[in-house]
Amino acid sequence: MPRSRTAEEILRRLVFLGGPSRAESAVHVEHIEAREPRYADWPEWADPLLIERLRANGVERPWSHQVEAAELLHAGHHTVLATGTASGKSAGYLLPALTRLLADANGGANYATPAGSRVSTTGADNSGTDAGMSTGADMGSSADGASGADFGTDTETDTDTRALAVGTRESTATVAGPREPTASASAAGARQSPVSARRDSSSRGSFSRGGATVLYLAPTKALAADQARRLRELDLPLPPAVCLDGDTGYEERRWIREHGAFVLSNPDMLHYSVLPDHRRWASFLRRLTYVVIDECHGYRGVFGAHVASVIRRLRRLCAHYGADPVFALASATTADPGATAARLTGLQVAEVTEDGSPHGRVLFALWEPPLTDGRGELGAPTRRTAVAETATLLADLAGEQVRTVAFVRSRRGAELVSVMAREDLARSGGAGEKIAAYRAGYLREERRALEAALQSGRLTAIAATNALELGVDIAGLDAVLLAGYPGTRASLWQQAGRAGRGGQEALAVLIARDDPLDTYLVHHPEALFGKPVEATVFDPGNPYVLWGHLCAAAAELPLREKDMELFGPGTHALVSELGNSGWLRRRADGWFWTRPERAADLSDLRGMGGEPIRIIEADTGRLLGMADGGSAAGAVHPGAVYLHQGESYLVRELDLDAAIALVEAKDPGYATYAREVAQVRIVREERAEDWNSHCRIACGTVAVTSQVVGYLKRDSRTGQVLGEEPLDLPEHTLTTKAVWWTVTPAGLEDALLAAPDIPGAAHAAEHASIGLLPLFADCDRWDLGGLSAAEHPDTGLATVFVHDGLPGGAGFAERGFAKARDWLTATKDAIKACECRTGCPSCVQSPKCGNGNEPLDKTGAIRLLEVLLKPS
């Protein structure tokens, strides 16, 4: 297809290729107008050489938001820059940070450039290229991948992202800065060791160990490596920037401690290595001038709470060594980024949100796959899976030479989309080799080859997980397909924003899964378009998270009275409790860690609590990975399909006492979904509102006792239920946060509900409300649980609970309480809008219901919610 075709022409052709029935799938089409660029002058204080190198990399003039953030940071204000995909956010912090490093390298001569020496801002405008200035990654679904994806229980967030952060590195310390002057090294971007780079840099000037340092934190090591590559392209006369992660060797770490100026790492490395070993890092920490926290919108839920504590520990040690660094945060567009950044850092943070970068016009289609002849549980109608529909659309677009990326939520799904799309294209006479898969787990060389092939046109289409967003900058795409709602509006816009980055028109298509939230969105476009994106939800004061970090902080330096305010209002009571239970010991000058184990090991930044389960290949004894103890029964139960590096394994045995799951390499062709039953006990009601004379909503702490009782097997291509297997696993108790609502007997009468109908009505309302809460809280339905009862023992009334699935809560239930009327109105509307008669996966059925989706009363749920929402 000629590149000159408009987005409307591409969409019309896509609909035409599928025949008359496909026209009904495009439920809504939104027109999003192009955004013109807004430029600003280079800051007067910016180093002239840095500006010269940025221009050489294609950036003639900066955009307005880049300069606004740079000015704030240069003036010493903690700042968050929250703008869209490909908006070059890194320029906002690189301008002040690199100018400071260059000034130190030159004896301070350039940090405050004399009047009259400012580089001229005349010349050609920046035409959208942001080489050297983009973050190189906009993590749309790093934090949004979910085990509830169409196929399998693997999650990009829980597996790929964690592996990229702390797993085996693709290369050791990446060097950015002076390079060996050989043609081959220059052409290939070959890395040096820090030692060889240090020798090379000696010819470029002498660097004092008394100069400033910069610490860059990314959620994954791939993103840090990409940023290092961009720094290398600037070729500045500075000590080499180096990546520090779990595979950095001893000699490299020593060199970084002694000579590192710009160090790129991740929160895991900071937590496990740098902070516990801070005395070795004293020289680096006392000179720390800027701390960059990239992709900070990805720090949500319990992970966000952990990182918030790590940042506070870093600030405490910096103060101990006499440093007071300025914090620079980069985020995707998000609601209230200043408040989010303040929760993460514990500081007052200025925000920059007006995006000055350009973007082409976008046509955004909301797409609902057709109903099939297949039947799901209880004979409910099923739609064609989002994965199968995405594969067909991807094949059609590739056949029309439309450069396309399809984002799929699981690695298995991405591989399956690519295989099915290649087969579809080959059957129609096209070149199936024009389509490939792209995901984490591939070797670095494989990923770079795929990126180059897509850039050059040798590949036309890619089916990708969010790994494509981790450290990858691909311009010139014409279309983006999203196989299911990625979890948040922020992620949606990030992924859709991958197309049209070269200024051309672009097509984005959201293909709905057979799920209450996706179904609601395609029929309620106003919930997506013209709405602000969500706030990032996490609770830095979560005691189940904070206690381990207080122990780690005490091991680093004794906890004193002045430290209590730093960690939040609940710290005094929690420290006293830790002392009473023997974790800390009080002396005259503070609280001390006196136990033999490493205190940092008490906290797993990306875990959910409980002793981790080792996943071992039975035939070889090879350790494949780890599963969180709190979620192991649902993830690696006997018979579960476990995915690792794109390969399928079947769990033979789960030994919770030995903390081992034995697996065998096998692809049975289906995915598994754990069934769970639960009981909820109210521990403490913390907030409540009477909505009318019959109904009340509350929020507080609950104890959830759950048990995995079986699992479903679903066909990987069609989504059809193949069977259900029982399990007998021990109970697990979780103390967390919940939101719940009650209806009196008089209210049930108003809802025309007789006693036999109440359990089904409440049960259906519970399932649907869990499915819709992610629209209002930064979470996925698989982060949540729920329970309904016709008469709950703690309330004596018909009650529906929705609770966080993480110890201590992650802020999702509280967000549900704050947005309860909007949330439950959307739940009612979603059920009413569904085409089915008695209930289906698109409205009230849940894939993880421990009761086999029985009883369910769709009509009763609507009546129950109408009474709940009736004005007082």
Image (cartoon, helix red, strand yellow):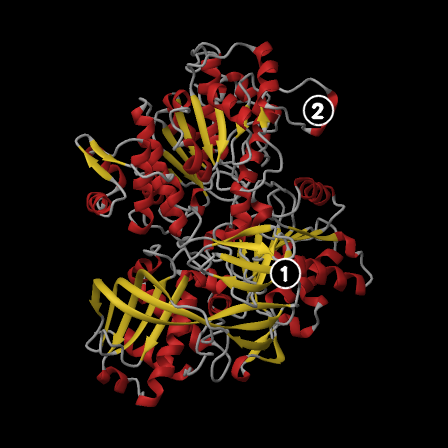
Q: Position of residue 441 (x, y in %)?
A: 62, 48
Name the residue furthest right: 429
Alpha-carbon neighbours of circle 2 within 10 Å: few (<14), some, or many (≥20)? few
Amino acid type at mark 1: Glu
User: 431 or 479: which is nearer to us?
Assistant: 431
Badge 2 marks a residue whose secondary structure is: helix
Q: Is residue 39 visible?
A: no
Q: Position of residue 584 (x, y in %)?
A: 25, 40
Residue 218 vertical placement versus 650 (above, below): above
Q: Is residue 181 visible?
A: yes
Q: CA distance from mark 1 to mark 2?
A: 42 Å
Alpha-carbon neighbours of circle 1 within 10 Å: few (<14), some, or many (≥20)? some
Badge 1 marks a residue whose secondary structure is: strand
Which of the numbered marks, if any, corresponds to residue 185? Answer: 2
Q: Quadrant of residue 641?
A: bottom right
Residue 83 vertical placement versus 212 (above, below): below
Q: Quadrant of residue 413?
A: bottom right
Amino acid type at mark 2: Ala
Which of the numbered marks, if any, corresponds to residue 664? Answer: 1
| 704 displayed left or right of 21 | left
Q: In which quadrant of the rendered image does the C terminus lie?
A: bottom left
Q: Could you tell me which residue is drawn at 70 percent across and 62 percent down?
A: 13
Q: Could you tell me which residue is drawn at 49 percent across and 22 percent down?
A: 260
Residue 724 vertical placement versus 267 (above, below): below
